[in-house]
Image (spheres, grey):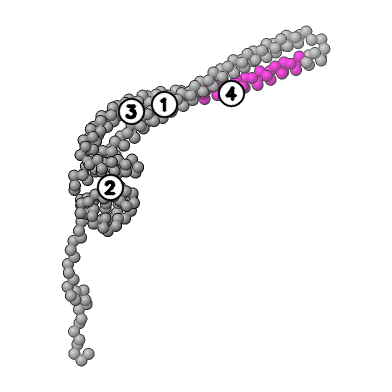
Amino acid sequence: MQERIENLIKLQRIELDRARLNQEARALPAESAQAEAALGAAERRSADVSAALNREDSIRTRLEREIDGHRQKAARFRAQLDAVKTPAQAEAIEHEIQFAGAEIERLENEEFASLERTEAREAELAESRAQVELLAASLEAVRVRAAARQQELVAELAALDEDRGDIRQRIDPEFLNRFDRLASARGTGIARAENQQCTGCRMGLRPQTWNQLREGELLACDSCQRLLYWDPAFAPAPKAPQPEAVPGAGRAIRKPRQAGA
């Protein structure tokens, strides 16, 4: 294979490796951002649960205050029963005492419901805080891994850039410019011809082009314009010769005719 073709193939391999590494480097911040977003969501959930617990505490404080008020009111009404002078007054006081008792029962039920919600919220808060700790540790691990990988990528890219500069100096400016233009437009600038097709765009090649490529020429694909080359290493192995058929082989043997038949 010509040195020019070999250098172009090496250059394309380097360019593809550089593109892959640069893409990986661009993805590193996204991985950290995703871990940060997950941690932020867990922290907000934990804060919401904590705030809900505080609201339940405030609710029970208010309920206790109201219950205490109704108990005091009921106690005052009971103390007034000894001083009533008419059945109507006694009936009114009894009504107030019953009302206070009903309110106390209702408020105590609300308080019990609040305690049940608090118990569930406390379990949820413990779970959310454990999740926050787990995600915080995961984020730190992602950051450490991303920083280490970033350093590796910088070193790998530096080595590729050095090889890239050396290879580019060995290629004729005319072909180098064509390669750069095609690689910028199509992602690759050179493609192998195989089975009378361009492996870059999978379009068929004219017989004359195919024959010229097999003679070692570097041509342009009529469809995608990529530089085309032929590599004999990818040529199909020739078929093994088949044995010649023996005349009459495979025919059924005729039985001799019996006398008098």
What secondary structure is found at the residue carrying circle 3? helix
Q: Nearer the viewer, residue 160 or 116?
A: 160
Give the label on residue 81, or none. none
Q: Which residues are magenta?
A: 93-122
Instruction: Give, as a three-letter code, the residue at label 4.
Output: Ala
Residue 225, how many percent across, how many down?
32, 48
Of labels 4 and 2, earlier in sequence is 4
Give the label on residue 146, or none. 3
Left or right? Give the position of 83 relative to 75.
right
Residue 230, how many percent across, how many down?
23, 51
Instruction: Check whether the beta carbons of the residues at disc 2 and disc 3 lie within 8 A of each other.
Output: no
**Mark whose residue sits in front, 1 or 2:** 2
Question: Measuring 65% from the left and 15% from the top, which residue is drawn there?
Answer: 66
Instruction: Give, as a three-letter code, the residue at label 1.
Output: Glu
Residue 42, how many percent across, how many down?
45, 26
Instruction: Name the residue that disc number 1 marks.
Output: 36
**Mark whose residue sits in front, 4 or 3:** 3
Q: Is residue 114 magenta?
A: yes
The quadrant of the image that shows the C terminus is: bottom left
Q: Is residue 10 magenta?
A: no
Residue 24 in the image: above or below residue 94: below
Instruction: Name the residue that disc number 4 marks.
Output: 113
